[in-house]
Amino acid sequence: MAEDESREEPFDRLIERLERTVERLEAPDLALEEALSLYEEGVAVLRRCLERLKAAEGKVEMLREEGERLLGAVPFEPAPPAEEEEDA
């Protein structure tokens, strides 16, 4: 798969690829050359996963800061307590 295509893969698909790669690496009859190739592929997929997570973390942080800024600009006024009706 081309590098540009894999960058566009959804995060859950990248995780699935990583899991399949690990399963293949755990095969007892795996040739050294294939193991190295799979390991290299796994590292590349892991790198993309980490990039996605870092981008998501940055977005969450930005939204959190924006929320704090908006909330800080609007004074909080608690709602008046609800009046309870007395049973007659």
Image (spheres, grey):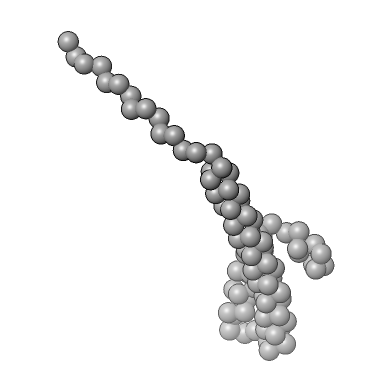
In the image, is 58 to the left or to the right of 1?
left
The answer to whether residue 79 of the structure is visible from this angle is yes
Q: In this orientation, which residue lies closer to the viewer: 75 or 34? A: 75
Q: Quadrant of residue 54?
A: bottom right
Q: Quadrant of the C terminus?
A: top left
Q: Quadrant of residue 59?
A: bottom right
Residue shown at 71% from the left, 80% from the top:
40
Q: In this orientation, which residue lies closer to the viewer: 36 or 77? A: 77
In the image, is 72 to the left or to the right of 83?
right
Give the percent coordinates (x, y) of residue 21. 64, 73
Q: Quadrant of residue 3?
A: bottom right
Q: In this orientation, which residue lies closer to the viewer: 46 or 67? A: 67
Residue shown at 67% from the left, 84% from the top:
35
Q: Is residue 72 above or below residue 46?
A: above
The answer to whether residue 17 of the structure is visible from this angle is no
Residue shown at 60% from the left, 60% from the top:
57
Which residue appears farthest toward the bottom when viewing the image?
A: 32
In the image, is 32 to the left or to the right of 76?
right
Give the percent coordinates (x, y) of residue 48. 69, 68
